[in-house]
């Protein structure tokens, strides 16, 4: 039997979405489904999907994945052992190992599933009061929870003067709302959402108030960065 082959890949999936975890293996004309064994495991021991004797082995599948996985049976004899994982959950993140045994040898493939989603463009709004300004920023449909920072014109962190609320939708994507009270007049506001780890999304937006509305002026910057 031939020596095994090994590859590593990464797949990014948003909470609630479907993903394909890739796995390919050498195949020949003399192959038949009875000779093909496909095993998918997560983090070393959890059985995600098992296929042998020409059928799926649902009895051995972890309950966490039951009803959410399937192979492309019509493509197995073409060397495609990829796994379709439905309704991605936060707990699905991790390393997945695909092992295929066939007459052409053994193939192993490692796939890291990163559960993440880019945040939408931040929406900024300014409310002018008596001698003060309330600044709101809202961004949604992202994951994981970001670190939200407010900075003034000197780059000093003023996050402690803000109020931030994070809510989750049914799939686990997050909406972030933050409010800060500024006593500045000439006001410039900027915001950005950045995923440093995967470069999923980078956005910037700014609003300005005219100097005629206020008299003394300062600058406030909002930075939203994801946790490493």
Image: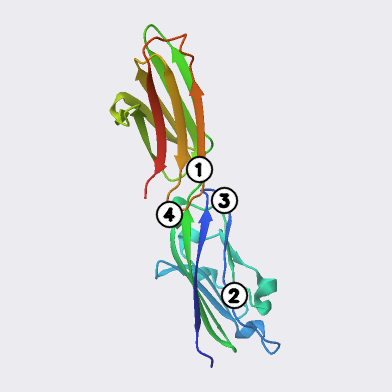
Residue 6 locus on image (x, y percent): 49, 78
Identify the residue under disc 1.
202
Circle 1: element type: strand
In primary-sequence order, the first of circles 2 and 3 is 3
Of circles 4 and 1, the one toward us is: 1
Assess disc 4: are there few (<14), some (14-19) or many (≥20) residues with their C-alpha within 10 Å of its C-alpha: few
The image's colour scheme reads: rainbow
Identify the residue under disc 2.
24
Circle 2: element type: loop
Number of the label disc, if any, that sits on residue 17: 3
Of circles 2 and 3, the one toward us is: 2
In primary-sequence order, the first of circles 4 and 2 is 2
Q: Is residue 121 above or below residue 30?
A: above
Disc 4 and disc 1: Cα gap in Å? 25 Å
Residue in view at x 51 percent, y 45 percent = 201
Marks 3/4 in contact by CB < 8 Å: the verdict is: no
Residue 130 locus on image (x, y percent): 38, 6
Disc 3 and disc 1: Cα gap in Å? 21 Å
Q: Nearer the viewer, residue 91 or 8?
A: 8
In primary-sequence order, the first of circles 3 and 1 is 3
Of circles 3 and 1, the one toward us is: 1
Circle 3: element type: loop
């Amino acid at each position: 039997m031939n020596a095994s082959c090994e590859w590593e890949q990464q797949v990014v999936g948003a909470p609630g979405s479907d993903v394909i975890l890739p796995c390919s293996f050498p195949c020949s004309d003399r192959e038949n489904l009875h000779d093909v064994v496909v095993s998918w495991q997560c983090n070393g021991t959890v059985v995600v999907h098992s296929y042998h004797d020409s059928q799926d082995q649902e009895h051995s599948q972890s309950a966490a994945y039951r009803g959410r996985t399937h192979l492309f049976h019509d493509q197995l004899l073409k060397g495609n052992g990829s796994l379709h994982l439905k309704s991605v959950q936060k707990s699905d993140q991790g390393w997945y190992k695909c092992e295929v045994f066939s007459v052409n040898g053994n193939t192993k493939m490692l796939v890291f599933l990163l559960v993440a989603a880019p945040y939408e463009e931040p929406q900024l709004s300014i409310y002018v009061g008596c001698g003060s300004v309330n600044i709101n920023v809202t961004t949604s449909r992202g994951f994981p929870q970001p670190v939200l920072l407010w900075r003034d014109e000197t780059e000093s962190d003023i996050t402690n003067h803000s109020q931030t609320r994070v809510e989750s939708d049914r799939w686990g994507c997050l909406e972030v709302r933050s409010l800060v009270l500024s006593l500045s007049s000439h006001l410039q506001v900027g915001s950005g959402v950045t995923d440093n780890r995967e470069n999923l999304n980078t956005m910037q937006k700014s609003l300005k108030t005219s100097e005629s509305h206020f008299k003394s002026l300062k600058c406030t910057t909002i930075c939203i960065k994801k946790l490493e």
